[in-house]
Amino acid sequence: MRASSTGTLPTAPDRGPARNPVQRPAAPALAVGYARAAWLSPEGEIERLDPVEAARRARRTPPVLCHGRAVARRLGIDAFAALDLLELYAFVRPARSLVPTARGLASALSLPAPRSLDDDALTLVRATEALLAELAAIGDSEAKVVAQQMAAAGWLWGAATLAALAPVQIEEPAGLAAWRRLGEWSEYAAEPPPGHEPVEETETRRRLAELLGADSEPRPQQADYAAAASAAFRPRERQDEPMAVLAEAGTGVGKTLGYIAPASLWAEKNEGAVWISTFTRNLQHQIDTELDRLYPEPTEKARRVVLRKGRENYLCLLNYEEAVGALPARPATAVGVGLMARWIQATRDGSLVGGDFPGWLPDLMGRGRTLGLADRRGECIHSACPHFRKCFIEKNVRAARQARLVVAN
């Protein structure tokens, strides 16, 4: 049954005529809380509904929402057809994640933060307009071909994305055959042995201060920790006996930057690589995030920092090609394959676990169409694979040989 109150929400503020005006789908927006739901009609009328009425309407008219499976679980029903903004976000901004909520969308798209369930519904409308406008501004022919194939499979965002991309001219796109646009790895001459310059405590403290920035709070314990770690980078006193430091510090001291400071200095001074081994993937990606301080420019960071993981963490291009080849028999999978094609074109290193792969995508598209495309232990055919010279794993191995900091798990 319908809730007692209705009203009209304001539209997005007028910012003048758009350079590339786009039309959003004439569909309602649905935001669901724990006991109530907000239903925003295309005309701007907001209604507060109970879960039963919200579920009835959603199954009858596909709404715009955020994270359809989570919304269905909250309504206590099976998944239903909807215009899921996470799908549109993954298409427009591949290899870029966000918190999968209306507030997360607002933060990622620089929209006003919602403060109520009604605001959530309005945010969904604003996010739709922002993403379609961004897609029109990109003018990507690859995106247009992928959108055509996804639309043919029944993707509910298909018509809107194709309308946004209408002026784009198509010139020999790869489409779902995303491997065609990937570059090949190259072999390099062996690196000369690294130098033996020591890392002094004073320069370690200075590097740590640079990483922290002038506005950081003083942490004497962190500086002492970093200075102590410098001893591990002194030249060996006896053959086959590397210097070693066993150090510990309490939670919150800042151990990560504490050992990054001397490690990065040694790598720079001696033109060699320092491998940082982690016990968990979470710590691996925490270190990677902290290294943005050292290498703020993404291109330089991609050359200097490499994450190494087991083979089963990376997309296998041969598995992906087989998924594309199976589309005539399973056309409904084209939506998931299309989103993977967009990600393949944009990913930093092809890692499906952590990194730039959205963690919520398997929940939307299914594990078999996402994580199930990873390399499977013992099945790789290596140089016999037609994608060997474009393989993400092989690229990762070779990139680590040229890097300065390798974070391994």
Image (tube, rainbow, N blue to C red):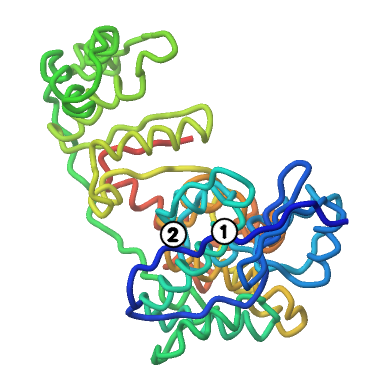
What kind of element bears circle 1?
helix
Q: Residue at x 22, y 20 (%)?
A: 233
Q: Crowdedness of circle 2 by 10 Å Cα count: few (<14), some, many (20+)? A: some
**Residue that carries the numbered disc 2 in the rendered image:** 347
| Residue 186 x/y as whole percent | 31, 63
The reply to whether residue 78 is in sight is no
Q: Residue at x 51, y 33 (%)?
A: 282
Q: Residue at x 26, y 11 (%)?
A: 219
**Residue that carries the numbered disc 1 in the rendered image:** 122
Spatial CA distance of label 2 from label 1 is 31 Å
The kind of residue on which mark 2 rests is Thr
Q: Residue at x 29, y 32 (%)?
A: 274
Q: Nearer the viewer, residue 300 or 399?
A: 300
Which quadrant is home to the N terminus?
Answer: bottom right
318 horizontally vs 111: left or right: right
| Residue 143 x/y as whole percent | 47, 78
| Residue 147 x/y as whole percent | 55, 80
Q: Vertically, is 145 above or below 283?
A: below
The kind of residue on which mark 1 rests is Leu
Could you say which quadrant of the image residue 380 lies in?
bottom right
Q: Crowdedness of circle 1 by 10 Å Cα count: few (<14), some, many (20+)? A: many
The reply to whether residue 150 is in sight is yes
**Between discs 2 and 1, the one toward the N terminus:** 1
What kind of element bears circle 2?
loop
Q: Nearer the viewer, residue 340 or 107?
A: 107
